[in-house]
Image: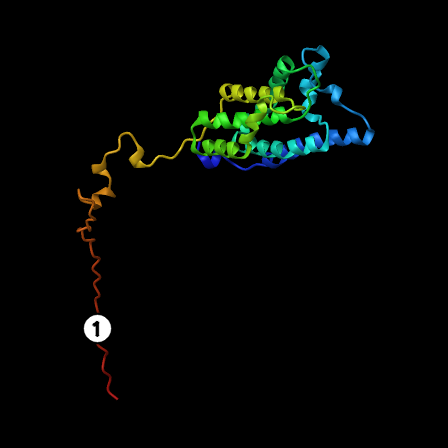
Amino acid sequence: MQANEHFKFSNGVVLAPLFAMLAIWTVFWVEVKLGINFNDYGIYPRRLSGLRGVAFSPFIHGSVEHLYNNTIPLAILTAFLVYFYQAAAFRVYVFGILISGLLTWLIARPSYHIGASGVIYVLASFIFFKGVFAKHFRLVALSLVVVFIYGSMLWYIFPVKENISWEGHLAGFITGFLLALAIKVKVPVEKKYDWEQEDYNEENDPFLKHFDEDGNFIESTEEEPENHIQIKYHFKKDSETDT
């Protein structure tokens, strides 16, 4: 599979991030419109009723600022995932939400944990580690882009700031790493030039034959065969007539 066939733009690159943004903003709009609070549907660690938050917590946010801070990274990373790992995108999302949610339920403090930040850490971690493991130059470059844009997020997997679910961030980071190991993706075959092949022989290279041992260019002495054109003239004598 060539790179141009593997990394192909599709409608999902636009629709998937749009759907993710609409989902979290719609839930928040319903809360504001109806004057209700869905925080109780977040993850509450080590409580059976708190398990429902595994599925619901990524859609619940406590404020506009919380929602806004998660919207842009969620959209960008989702677009990256769908474009570069289209075949694996759905599995990464589903397993990412479930596994990171369960880990949060196991290790987090007794409190309601809400927000899409856990999913964001899943995506960032998966894209980074998968690019490193794949060793394809485009995917490695994508990993570096993720580090450049979102590298500072790494600090928030530690308890450096109050009122944030660092446990959810840590769970998402670990989940992304595990999914990068477990989920197999097809990596496009990089085009190799003749001189990169194992059986390459310099003596048979038609280009290198134009250079001597010192690297000097040798003009070709072979003369191209000339096409001789023969032109034959036919003279026709006019018949004379008496008047």
Mark yes or no: residue 208 visible.
yes
Query: How many residues crowd around disc 1 within 10 Å: few (fewer than 14), some, or many (20 or more)?
Result: few
Question: Which amino acid type is marked by label 1?
Answer: Phe
- 15 to the left or right of 193: right
The secondary element bearing badge 1 is classed as loop
Determine the image quadrant of residue 89.
top right
* Placement of the C terminus among the 4 image quadrants: bottom left
| Residue bearing mark 1 | 235
Picture coordinates of residue 81, whole percent (x, y): 55, 30
- 123 to the left or right of 60: left
- 208 to the left or right of 75: left
> Residue visible at 52% across and 21% down?
177
> Residue visible at 63% across and 25% down?
161
Looking at the image, which is closer to me, 83 or 68? Answer: 68
- 62 to the left or right of 208: right
Picture coordinates of residue 10, whole percent (x, y): 57, 36
Looking at the image, which is closer to me, 56 or 61? Answer: 61
